Image: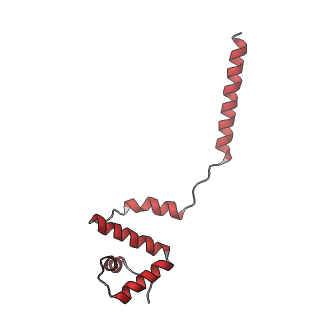
Amino acid sequence: MNKNFDIAYLRKYVNGELSSSEMYAIEKASHEDEFLMDVLMGLEEEKKLKKPLDVSDLHTPIFERSHEPKIRSFRSYRLLGIAASLLLVFGYWDHLVSK
């Protein structure tokens, strides 16, 4: 069975317009393919809302799932440490000078 389903075919699945063997093939494939399961869940949500989903709303979640989170470098923390040290030194210096 072809596991490359187009969106119109998957909409028929969500609407219950396929035969039981066709629906079983999609269900079996969705258990093996996480992306297909996500598409089916999105189509079910689209059906509940009774309007097509805005594709631009999908770009952010897809990007977040497909890219590892950016790890901050220690450089920015080092700069914060230097700035905090300078504040302490200047504060202490001001305290000594004002006596």
The figure's colour scheme reads: secondary structure
The picture places residue 69, in percent across and down from the top left corner, at 57, 56
Quadrant of the snapshot with the C terminus: top right
Give the side of residue 6 with respect to residue 86, left or right: left
Quadrant of the snapshot with the N terminus: bottom left
**21 or 72: which is nearer to us?**
21
**66 or 26: which is nearer to us?**
26
Q: Residue at x 41, y 62 (%)?
A: 58
The picture places residue 75, in percent across and down from the top left corner, at 67, 44
Give the side of residue 4 with respect to residue 67, left or right: left
Q: Residue at x 50, y 60 (%)?
A: 64
Q: Residue farthest to the left? A: 50
Please tell me in which quadrant of the rendered image residue 47 appears. Answer: bottom left
Relative vertical location of residue 18 with respect to residue 66 in this rendering, above or below: below
The picture places residue 9, in percent across and down from the top left corner, at 34, 81
Relative vertical location of residue 65 with respect to residue 9 in this rendering, above or below: above
Please tell me in which quadrant of the rendered image residue 86 appears. Answer: top right
The picture places residue 31, in percent across and down from the top left corner, at 48, 78
Please tell me in which quadrant of the rendered image residue 98 appears. Answer: top right
Q: Residue at x 47, y 72 (%)?
A: 35
Can residue 4 be seen at all in this image of the molecule? no
Can residue 29 be seen at all in this image of the molecule? yes
